[in-house]
Amino acid sequence: LCDNCKRQGRVWCPHNAALEIRARISGSLKQEMFGPTPPNIFVGHNFYPKVYWGPLVSEKQVEDDPSKMYGMSLERIIEARASMVRGMKRSGVRESSRMLSEAQQAVMSIRPVDAEARFSRTPVFSLEFDDVSHPIGASAPIERFKVTDNPVIPKKVDELHEEGVRAQAALAELLLEGFGVHYLSKLLASGILGTHENRKLVPTKWAITATDDIAAKQY
């Protein structure tokens, strides 16, 4: 156990596990990647309203939904999260771009979609742990992201997106339709929901909290 885990009385150390995983994964990181995006994006909250955001890309299919991780060992969960590379692009939360449109198509899909990504340099591994957000492994500034597969987008999600229904009302309706909070928090973070004039990226932490709050009030 590391000193921090000893002080907190833990019986297992995620930090030492992260070092072992880093040693296994770092050698496979490269500037261009092709594989199934989870699908997900991460939106940071620092420097809001001009934030760092980007799609998560992996060369193998990994589990991204926390509700489906029940029963998995902590090491397996950390390794799954660490195998995803986060692209980083800085822009205003209301700015639109082709890359954002591609990432939104991926996020709306209920199944992983193949995607190509090119980074400005080889991603650097730096696994961080957070009380709210999932651990993320390597990251690098992203130059290009393109979905090369057909996303499977639920009809109801597509309708609410096209109609520009207010985000809170759309989330409530999708909860009633049986969609999970993890999927819905991704839609909110990606700027997919809301009226057309008010759509924007929402930092991942805030999107998770807002979706959980709406779900708690509804149930």
Image (spheres, rainbow, N blue to C red):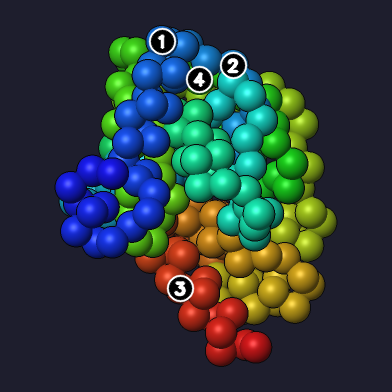
**What kind of residue is marked 2?**
Phe
The x and y percentages for residue 63 are: 63, 42
Dot 4 or dot 3: first in sequence order is 4
Residue under the point 78% across and 62% down: 156
Residue under label 3: 210
Which amino acid lies under the numbered mark 3 shown in the image of this protein?
Answer: Ala
Residue at the spot of label 4 = 117
Q: Which residue is mark 2?
A: 34
The disc placed on residue 27 is 1
Q: Is residue 157 left or right of residue 132?
A: right
Residue at 74% of width from left, 41% of height from top?
Answer: 111
The disc, 4 or 2, on the residue closer to the chain's N-terminal end is 2
| Tag 3 near tag 1, CB within 8 Å | no
Determine contact: label 4, label 2, CB under 8 Å. yes
Position above or below: 217 against 49: below
Q: Mark 1: give few (<14), some (14-19) or many (20+) Cα within 10 Å.
A: few
Residue 57 rendering spot, x and y as whole percentages? 53, 29
Q: Nearer the viewer, mark 2 or mark 1?
A: 1
Q: Quadrant of residue 2?
A: top left
- Tell me the element at label 3: helix
